[in-house]
Image: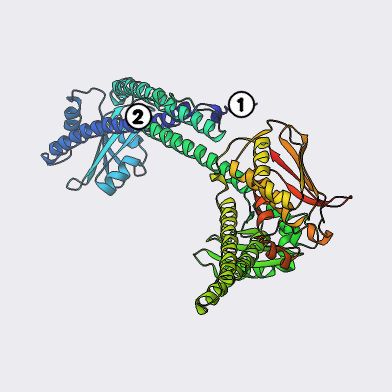
Amino acid sequence: MRISFPIHFLPFSQRLFFSVITLFIAFVICFMAFQYRREKDYKVELLNTQLQNYNDQLNNFLSDQDTLNISLLGQYVSHHPLNDLRVTLIDTKGKVIFDNFIQNPEQFKNHLNRKEIQQALQKGSGYAIHRLSESTGGEFFYSARYYNKLGIIIRSARPYNVSLIQSLSTDSHYIWFALIISLILIGMFHSFTHKLGMSITQLQQFALKADRNEPINPNIQKSFPKNELGEISTHIIQIYQRLHHTKEALYIEREKLITHLQIAHEGLGIFTSQKKEILVNVLFKQYINFISDKNLSHMQEIFSIPELKPISQFISEHQEKSEKEVRRMSLEIEKDGRIFALECILFQDNSFEISINDVTQETEQARLKKQLTQNIAHELKTPVSSIQGYLETIVNNPELPREQMHTFITRCYAQSNRLTHLLRDISLLTRMEEAPQMAEKETVNLSVMVKNILNEVTLQLEEKQITVSNLLPTDLCIQGNSSLLYSIFRNLTDNAIAYAGTQIQVTIRCFRQGEKFYYFSFADTGVGVSPEHLGRLFERFYRVDKGRSRKLGGTGLGLAIVKNAVLLHEGSIFAKNNPGGGLEFIFTLAKK
């Protein structure tokens, strides 16, 4: 059974070590094999050179002889220091002429097919290593050379015995030297890869923790070695920490932005370029369902609403153009008495947002302001015209009787008082609407305040035979603005004196006390108001009987001031007709 070692389970340092060491060992083996072969070839070449030198010497000896003398040749060969040296002379046809090992050359076969002979004839020299001799039965190392002048091949040979094998064998010292150096380098490389592996392993663990968003040890930088990789790892961790802090800050800002958008006072929907929902707040869903004729189960359905067709066309047209700028369009939709202002903003990446604002109240307020301006101009015109008319009569008639002149001046004074009261009430209403937070709060004793108001209007009450029952408890105190609280009870009292009639009863009481509010009733037994006028009593300049109101000198702002003052004290107010006759105002005031 074959067993494979799962190397991919090893640490990086060991995998790196084994991979490089495998290549290194392969290199060392190849190098040693090459060196072994190179040294062996060197020994062989050295032996071949020695034999070729002998061949040359023998050639010189033969060249000095007139004829080939076999006996002299045998003597010459026998005097060589190597006793085992074999010398053979062969002609160009492969016939053996002389051999010092064999006395009868006729015993030899043709040597033309011998390797060293073929090389000698072709290249001038050649050799053959441990080839078996057919004549002697032993192995020899042959070295042959062809001499053209003599026309013969001289071949010298040595027996391939133990002595020759040892002389041709390579020196093993370089192998041991190579092994020792290799072991030293392997140890040094193991130490290096171990340190490198520790750095990479720590960096890998850091990357895994960062990917899983697990807590990172703040002192991890100190565990890296003091080398280039450690420095790089330290910089990576510092960059990560900065990015992590930035990510946390962005996440906080994102949550703040989402929270802000969710509680914003406008409907907001953000969508991708494919019209998929990214963020839609509650108000957007409410408004879009009000605009739609059917309830929407998915926000993608808003683009099928007929009223939003211009926005859908705008998005489609501009997404195709791929313009590198922010594009926007506005749209106003009126639906079931409510007015909505829509704005679509298309961003550079073709994502977009749609905002919806309910501008019904703003539109109504604009209409009311316009109407108020007209009413103010109309109300101011009346006393100014009266004053101008009386004064013009006096100026143009210097002989006007004194009594009539006094009457005109008195009327001018009355109209100027009315004008003063009108401007004061307008100023008070403006302050209450535009700067309600500037109203100073203090502890106010309503019992004492109402008592003082009734003392101030005693003459008017007696003139119209009005009886007032002040049923407020003693020391009824609240935290509020003294001037505005005074305006509430004074205007209600003036309203009863001016319009309720004569010989009536007025009752002021606090009929309930809750945890946060006092509940008040201001009722009279006068003429009351027709039901169709009850809902509009608190409108500015609204008059039940316009001619009678102007005659009585009212500004038409008294009940509007009352309502605003009550609202600024976190209360509410409404008017109703009593079953027994007369008008009753029910209102609440916050204790604090």
Q: Locate residue 137, reporting x and y percent.
A: 39, 28
Occupied quadrant, residue 3: top right
Which residue position holds label 2? 32
Q: Amino acid at mark 1?
A: Ile
Q: How many discs appear?
A: 2
Q: Is residue 467 left or right of residue 427?
A: right
Answer above or below: position of 457 versus 46: below
Measured from the top left, where is residue 364 in percent x and y?
67, 63
Cα–Cα gap, marks 1 and 2: 30 Å
Q: Residues within 10 Å of mark 2 (few under 14, many from 20)?
A: some
- The answer to which of marks 1 and 2 sits earlier in the sequence is 1
Residue 334 vs residue 480, the one in the foreground: 480
Residue 516: image location, x then y, percent: 71, 34
In the rendered image, residue 399, in percent from the top left (x then y), is placed at 52, 77
Q: Is residue 320 visible?
A: no
Residue 143 visible somewhere in the drawing: yes
Front one among 155 and 391: 391
The label nearer to you, 1 versus 2, is 1
> Is 39 above or below relative to 566?
above
Judged left or right of residue 70, residue 464 is: right
| Residue for badge 1 | 3
